[in-house]
Image (cartoon, helix red, strand yellow):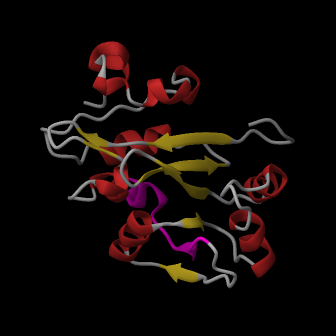
C-alpha cells in the first residue's frame, strides 16, 4: 500500500480439495483460522455487524479459542490489534454497504501500528485479508510449520498472485508456486 509509511497486505486462503471445500472458515478443523490466530496472538478487538444491523458490537478477545471462533464467524466486521477502537473507527471500518473500509482510515490505523483483519468472501464461507504495518510472511511461515504433514501450505508474495485465479492455484496447478511451499 502507498502512503507516508510502508504498509503490508496479505490474504489467507484455504481449501480442502478432497472434501471440495474452498474457504478458510469452512474447514472443519479450523486450521486456517488457527494459523491466523497464532500470527495475531492477541489481544484483538473484534467488531461483528450482521448485514442490516445498525449497532456496533465490540469485544476484546484474549484467548486463542475465542480468537479462532471469531475468525471463523466473522461477518461484515473487522478485527484489529494494538489500538483501543472508538465507535467512529469501527463504524468507519465496517459501516459501508459493500463491506469495504475507507482506505484513508485503514492507512491512519496502519500508521498507528494497528493490524487489521477483514473477511473476504470465498466459494464457501470466507478467507481473510490482513493489513499490517510490518511484514508478516515469516510469522505465517513459522505458524504453518505447525500444521500436520498432510496439509500443504504456501506463503506467496501478494504481488505474485493476481486475481481470483491466482488465489485458487491449487485447483489447477499446485506446482505453480512450489518455490513458496512451507516445509
The location of residue 67, given as percent across then percent down, is 42, 71
Magenta span has 50? Answer: yes
In this rendering, the answer to whether 33 lies above or below 141 is below
Total labels drawn? 0
User: What residue is shown at x 54% (from left), y 81% (from top)?
Assistant: 60
The location of residue 149, given as percent across then percent down, is 13, 39
- Which image quadrant: the C terminus? top left
* Residue 8 lies in quadrant: top right
- Name the side, left or right, on which 183 lies relative to 132: left
Magenta span has 55? Answer: no
The location of residue 6, given as percent across then percent down, is 75, 38
User: What residue is shown at x 74% (from left), y 62% (from top)?
Assistant: 96
* Residue 144 lies in quadrant: top left
- Which image quadrant: the N terminus? top right
Q: Which residue lies most toward the front here? A: 52
- Name the side, left or right, on which 83 lies relative to 16: right
Relative depth, front residue between 129 and 19? 19
* Residue 4 lies in quadrant: top right
Start-end of magenta stretch: 36-51
- Name the side, left or right, on which 125 lies relative to 160: left
Relative depth, front residue between 7 and 75? 75
User: What residue is shown at x 45% (from left), y 78% (from top)?
Assistant: 62
User: What residue is shown at x 41% (from left), y 55% (from top)?
Assistant: 36
The location of residue 5, given as percent across then percent down, is 80, 42
Amino acid at each position: 500500500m502507498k502512503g507516508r509509511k510502508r504498509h503490508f497486505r496479505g490474504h489467507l486462503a484455504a481449501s480442502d480439495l478432497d472434501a471440495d471445500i474452498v474457504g478458510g472458515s469452512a474447514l472443519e478443523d479450523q486450521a486456517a483460522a488457527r494459523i491466523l490466530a497464532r500470527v495475531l496472538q492477541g489481544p484483538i478487538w473484534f467488531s461483528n455487524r450482521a448485514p442490516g444491523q445498525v449497532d456496533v458490537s465490540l469485544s476484546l478477545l484474549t484467548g486463542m479459542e475465542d480468537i479462532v471462533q471469531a475468525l471463523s464467524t466473522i461477518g461484515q466486521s473487522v478485527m484489529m490489534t494494538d489500538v483501543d477502537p472508538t465507535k467512529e473507527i469501527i463504524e468507519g471500518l465496517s459501516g459501508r454497504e459493500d463491506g469495504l473500509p475507507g482506505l484513508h482510515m485503514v492507512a491512519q490505523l496502519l500508521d498507528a501500528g494497528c493490524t487489521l483483519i477483514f473477511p473476504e468472501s470465498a466459494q464457501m464461507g470466507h478467507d481473510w485479508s490482513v493489513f499490517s504495518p510490518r511484514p508478516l510472511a515469516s510469522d505465517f511461515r513459522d505458524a504453518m510449520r505447525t500444521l500436520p504433514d498432510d496439509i500443504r501450505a504456501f506463503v506467496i508474495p501478494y504481488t505474485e498472485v493476481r486475481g481470483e485465479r491466482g488465489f485458487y492455484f491449487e485447483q489447477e496447478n499446485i506446482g505453480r508456486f512450489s518455490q513458496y511451499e512451507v516445509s
